[in-house]
């Protein structure tokens, strides 16, 4: 590791306005400047103003070259290269702690990361310490895995006798059911004066089946897509490509 890593990581860059003015040749002419001005006037114009920021890429490249090595050795090498009495030392150490997850454990043969809410199988850090070997590893294949396995999707959620949630083509809908209409009895008089009755079976359109139905106990009379808030409330999700 280079001895001046703290200077590389904690480098200072010129203010954007000053760098742009110098690049475009907009430096003010000395004859056009006032004879007297306050000490802050130049900084208000963005002249020779520098800002300090942390650069994580040098540390990232250093850690990538040390993947597979013992984390204790890598950490000791990093601390040895940083000045002990430099105020930038703590900032660099905190940046490394953010990039490397050291609180790890094995659970059911898999690496989990210990957090304040319990173990989880995902982390935002780019590197982690292998709990079995103590070596530095990448988290590229572990970042999107969480401790609690995803609950199996339910194709049907019953709210009450007249309301159910159905997932149709990956989208959740609220289906409203109504009782099937009772048969209609029609009475009519024939030409000879006799009275006759005819039972008419009602026909309704079922929105869930997408066709006309002639009998049954109920039918889908209403259909509405669930909102985002309802999906979160009932822990549901739409399946989209």
Image (tube, rainbow, N blue to C red):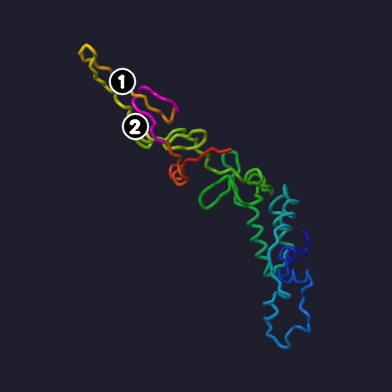
**Residue for point 23% across, 16% down:** 189
Q: Position of residue 86 (x, y in %)?
A: 70, 70
- Badge 2 is on which residue? 178
Is residue 164 at least partly visible in the picture? no
Assign a secondary structure to mark 1.
strand
Instruction: Name above or below for residue 216 compared with residue 54.
Output: above
Q: Which of the 4 image quadrants contains residue 191? A: top left
**Residue for point 45% across, 37% down:** 173
* The N terminus: image quadrant: bottom right
Q: Position of residue 144 (x, y in %)?
A: 60, 44
Instruction: Name above or below for residue 233 compared with residue 30.
Output: above
Q: Position of residue 210 (x, y in %)?
A: 45, 28
The region drawn magenta spans: 210-222
**Residue for point 70% across, 61% down:** 55
Counting residues from the start of the chain, the first of labels 1 and 2 encountered is 2
- Badge 1 is on which residue? 200
Magenta stretch encompasses residue 17: no
Instruction: Name above or below for residue 193 compared with residue 158.
Output: above
């Amino acid at each position: 590791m280079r001895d001046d890593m703290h200077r590389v990581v904690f480098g200072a860059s010129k203010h954007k306005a000053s760098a742009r003015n110098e690049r475009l040749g907009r430096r003010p002419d000395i004859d056009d400047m006032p004879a007297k001005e306050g000490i802050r006037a130049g900084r208000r114009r963005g002249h020779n103003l520098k800002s300090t920021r942390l650069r994580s890429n040098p540390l990232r490249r250093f850690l990538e070259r040390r993947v597979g090595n013992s984390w204790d050795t890598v950490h000791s090498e990093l601390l040895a290269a940083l000045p002990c009495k430099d105020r930038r030392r703590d900032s660099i150490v905190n940046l490394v702690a953010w990039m490397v997850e050291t609180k790890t454990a094995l659970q059911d043969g898999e690496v989990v990361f210990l957090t304040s809410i319990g173990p989880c199988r995902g982390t935002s850090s780019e590197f982690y310490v292998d709990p079995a070997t103590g070596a530095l590893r990448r988290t590229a294949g572990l970042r999107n895995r969480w401790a609690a396995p995803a609950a199996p999707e339910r194709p049907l959620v019953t709210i009450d006798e007249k309301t159910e949630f159905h997932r149709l083509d990956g989208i959740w809908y609220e289906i409203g059911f109504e009782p099937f209409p009772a048969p209609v009895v029609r009475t009519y008089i024939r030409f000879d004066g006799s009275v006759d009755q005819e039972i008419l079976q009602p026909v309704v359109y079922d929105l869930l089946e997408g066709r006309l139905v002639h009998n049954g106990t109920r039918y889908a009379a209403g259909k509405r897509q669930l909102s985002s808030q309802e999906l979160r409330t009932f822990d549901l999700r739409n399946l989209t490509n």
